Image (tube, rainbow, N blue to C red):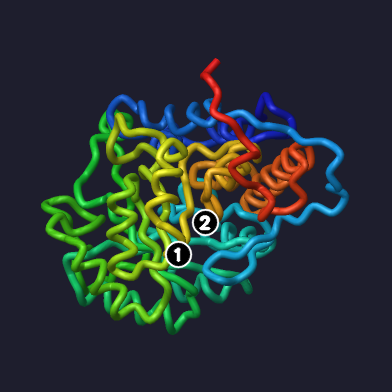
Amino acid sequence: MSSIAEPINLFDFEAIAKERLPKEEYDYIAGGATDEISVDRNRRAYATWAFRPRVLRDVSGLDLSTTVLGAKVDFPVLIAPCGGHKKAHPEGEFATFRAAAACGSIFAVSANASADFTELRQAATGRLWLQLYPFRDKATTKEWLARAKQDGYEAVCVTLDSQWPAKRERNIRNQYENRRGANYSKDRPRPQRGTHPGGGDPAATWKDLAWIKSIAGLPVVAKGIMTGEDVALCAEVGADGVIVSNHGGRHLDNTLATVEVLSEAVNAAAGKLEVYLDGGIRRGADVVKAIALGAKAVFIGRPLFWGLAYAGEQGVVRVMNILREEIEITMAKCGRPNIASIDASTIAKALPL
């Protein structure tokens, strides 16, 4: 039995998951690169913005809906492409997809998912994106793009910050061996980066992203962008969106937090593509701050595992609903009746406490 009877925020969910999951699985999910400074900074950086609440504005009919790549979502919290949901619950990605569909959100399915892409598509009526890397094996890229279109995936999310393996010391100490994703062909070796399995080709360049865009036949969103220069290059090759992300601090330590570079990314995008954010989202207030800084929507990663560990599909639904409730409270207190009304005047830069 957990010491927490009923979780009321995302931190409670993590505490329960830490008790329930094997140590090596919890450490794999929670951990980051080397000293985990970026993991911590992603979270703490939200405290450097404060709200400017407004009163006597009609907030009797709050509307949290917005559009992502031109289609409506019920609220601006999406599920990030994180591999191996079976680490936290036997139903894995199937439970996550059903939860995302029930919440009117989007589930970006990891290249390293523990569920077959096609079988997953049949699990619910909802919106799916497919994540991949700039694989060295171009045949794998073509095969996955063809499957994505055939199976009704709405977009391709190309992760660009995983061209070289990270040093994750929790995994080293635990002698953790990550399982092979379910979608790599049994008769073809898993795509390689250098001498390490998985991830992107270390020789990949912007030409590779342009090539993926040219053959995808679907909107392409570039993930792992942390500078305005790279946002501009994404726009040049025709990307439809970018996810400002430092991979949850799991690949390169000592970066700025994603929310700290969000304004730079939005300015560089200049309205040519949509800008999303992941990293450190634990409160509905964080979501509102990200939108005020120009994000179209945000993605959550680790919290979905904590929800799965708590109660599978219903645990993920509960995580999403807690964020929804906190977004509603923040919007109402700030006098913002809909997502479009959340602008830069909603927040002010504040000294850290």
Q: Give coordinates of residue 166: x percent, y percent.
A: 24, 40
Image point (35%, 28%), residue name: 36
Q: Give coordinates of residue 157: x percent, y percent.
A: 39, 63
**In the displayed structure image, the side of residue 243 where residue 303 appears, left or right:** right
Image point (12%, 53%), residue name: 194
Q: Residue furthest top?
A: 353
- Relative to 173, does residue 203 appear above or below in the rendering? below
- Relative to 262, does residue 98 appear above or below in the rendering? below
Label 2 residue SS? helix
Image point (39%, 79%), residue name: 147
- Relative to 135, does residue 198 appear above or below in the rendering? above
**In the displayed structure image, the side of residue 27 where residue 91 appears, left or right:** right
- Relative to 33, does residue 120 appear above or below in the rendering? below
The numbered mark, 2 or 1, whose residue comes first in the sequence reads 2
Q: Give coordinates of residue 88: x percent, y percent.
A: 51, 46
Q: Residues within 10 Å of mark 1 (few under 14, many from 20)?
A: many
Q: Name the residue under label 1.
A: 115
Q: Name the residue under label 2.
A: 92
